[in-house]
Amino acid sequence: MAKITTENYVAEAKKAIKNQVLQEALADLQHRFGRGTAECYRQLPEGPDLRLRAHDIRMKDIENLDVVLETLVANIRKNGGHVYFAEDGQAAVNYCLEVAHKHKVRRVVKGKSMVSEEIGLNDALVEAGIDVSETDLGEYIIQLAGETPSHIIAPAIHKTRSEIGSLFADKLDIPYDDDPSRLTWAARKALREKFLAADMGTSGCNIACAETGHITTLSNEGNIRMSTTMPRIHVAFMGMERVAARLEDHDILLRLLCRGAAAQNMATYVSYIGGPRSAGEVDGPQEFHLVVLDNGRSRILADEEFREMLCCIRCAACLNVCPVYAKIGGHSYGYAYSGPVGAVVTPLLVGINRAADLCQGETLCGACQDICPVNIDIPRMLLALRTKLAEGDSAWGVTPADRKEKLLFQAWSWMIRNRRLYDAAVKLAATGQRLFAQKDDMIGRLPPPVHGWTKGRDIKPLAAESFISRWKKSL
Amino acid sequence: MNTASQEEFIHKIKIALGKPLAESQRNVDFFKSDMSDETRGILERIKNRTPEERKKLLATLIEAAGPINLKVISCEDINSVTAAIADLVRDKDPEWGAKKSVVAWQHPLIENLNLPEALSPQDVTVFFTDVKETESGNLRQHVIDSYIGITAADFCMADSATMVMRTRPGQARSVSLVPSIHVAVIELNQIIADLKELYALLKWDPQESKEGLTNCMTFISGPSKTADIEATMVHGAHGPRQVHVYVITS
Ligand code: SF4
């Protein structure tokens, strides 16, 4: 199974903030993509409000998911493809292993896919003794380095060219070089051999189209086309929600996806795959398998508060504008999904308590919703998750994260509804605060148990006399 | 295969959506849409496009091609395309081996280029991805060995500079992918405005919709690229490093 390290959020975030290389790369990414995407939306013939229409389209797809999915798979079977419905990650992985075993697969090339990260496909294949290569350049670098991706679209942004140069010198047995072009071509050469020797290629699915019976995959590098064209067998994994009903809907979603993901009008390569090679065709895979994955999604679907999250088309636009992601980077989020999308999806998939820090770390600034190609109200869902953490929720199996905090707020709520008590407390605090060091008219350190407040910031002292009492006097 | 698991899976979705379990009546209307007036308008527009309007689309295509490093060259007639390709073959060196060979689609437009004859003075072999080659078992190797791949296209969308190719016998998908340089030859009337027009054709045009998307429809917008190392743009990650599109305007 995939590794989940959401518990390390704080520690990983600290590490990331100290990492100068990462900080610069993240800033650059946000600067280019964040702005570029917004500009792309403005230039749409239909204008940026197309996002709102896209939201409605996605919601309608989700609310009819049973019909839409059945149509998709019926069409794919008609085209000669195999479809497998996987209840969870393990079932999806097992199916892939079965197919691999049946066809005596020894080498697999992987086209980048979030779902395969989610289910831990890589490790499972390796354990089965299969040679697995990531083929997206960023993912390939990460695989050689034995790390995990830090961004959905740019997995290796945390590595410098000289680090990559040394890595390639070591692993590919080539002279050290730190020129990005020559490094890219070195990887091109190494991976070309992998593509041509592979027995099986795997991919994800960006947005399928039900009425035609196709999955679509996007890439700029061409690795996904290679992985789905050259090997004998193609296995595609898709989250059960990643499907549009009709071509008209697909048009809008595809255009928005390209803009959201990389501020492009169109990805360099878009493939619509409906089945294996047909009779008389001279190349392409002989077998095509589609694995449709639930893995906790039906639970999200059942909860109207979070159903909207299934509209997500995993474009990563929200990462590129998120002020929190910009500082702490992808590793802190501890699972396949990072940034605002991860802060909602990960708790829902791996457990709300377990991933509590993720939704609590975000700022609720709303930038993610504004840039989201399908206008998902992420801040609303972050708040909903926090409410569950504060109050507990039996349906999601959430225990209140901090009973002390809850007690404190109950006391506070009782006090502020009690005028005289409140006045007395404020007076006491105004007198008592003189005991603490003040600098430039600010309090720099409070005592336990409230010392956390001043850990990273100073606070303003209370006025000697409250507004209400001054106001009363002047009457 | 696995119909049991499918039933359970879909059943679970229905419960999640709160749909009545006994609901057997399919929501058929969901997919049934009549051709909208907008679509009718789009199809009319494509059909009645004047040569001037087509030239305008070509200008849009050239403009969109610039930033993504796609080379679009307009040629008066097919002979000038042949000459241009012969020049390209002369000027460019193979990336992987020393020997120059070219692989091309079996397609009327491509066969009319008479490439074997045009390239024989340079001693360059042209392989066609036809059934004969497939049966001989050499096709894959020829594609791998060739440094230039030549294809036609079904359409070209001007606003994003995207070539659209469906898969058919004789028209191997790997020709536009594995060789270092991809050359595509199209005619002026294959240029359409955008994705909306393409989808309207594929879904509603009687002829196009009969063939449908095929089992593999590919969009190509320029050469392969990556910016995964320090956000520096590099062309030729895995696919072709260069893409040349020749548009026959006559
Ligand atoms: S939440 Fe929206 S912006 Fe973020 S990945 Fe999903 S679709 Fe993209």
Image: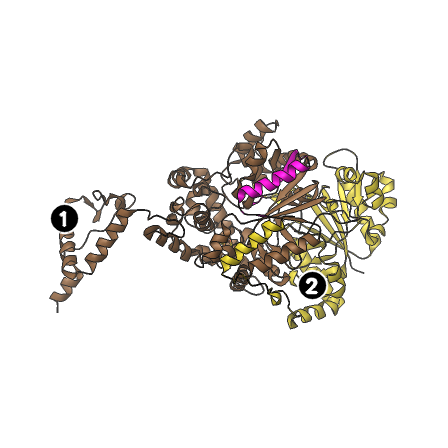
Chain colours: A brown, B yellow
Q: Bin the neighbour count of mark 2 within 10 Å (Cα to Cα): few under 14, some 14-19, many 20 and up.
A: many
What is the distance, in whole Å, between disc 2 and disc 1 at their CAs?
76 Å
Please state which of residues B68 and B172 is positioned toward the viewer in this rendering: B172
Q: Residue furthest left?
A: A473
Q: Nearer the viewer, mark 2 or mark 1?
A: 2
Find disc 1 in the rendering and name its residue. A432
Q: Is residue A198 left or right of residue A176?
A: right
Q: Is residue B130 left or right of residue A111?
A: right
Q: Chain of mark 1?
A: A
Q: Are marks 2 and 1 on the same chain?
A: no
- Which circle marks residue A68 in the picture? none
- Residue A140, horizontal then vertical, whole percent: 58, 37
Identified by mark 1, the residue type is Gly
Circle 2: element type: helix
Quadrant of the rendered structure where residue B158 is? bottom right
Span highlighted in magenta in the image: A85-113
Q: Is residue A270 left or right of residue A473?
A: right
Residue A25 is a magenta residue? no
Mark 2–mark 1 contact, CB under 8 Å? no
- Residue A333, horizontal then vertical, whole percent: 44, 43
Numbered label tally: 2
Q: Is residue B93 visible?
A: no
Identified by mark 2, the residue type is Lys
Please state which of residues A217 and A298 is positioned toward the viewer in this rendering: A298
- Above or below residue A36? Residue A88 is above
- Which circle marks residue B203 in the picture? 2
- Residue A281, horizontal then vertical, whole percent: 78, 48
- Above or below residue B207? Residue A194 is above
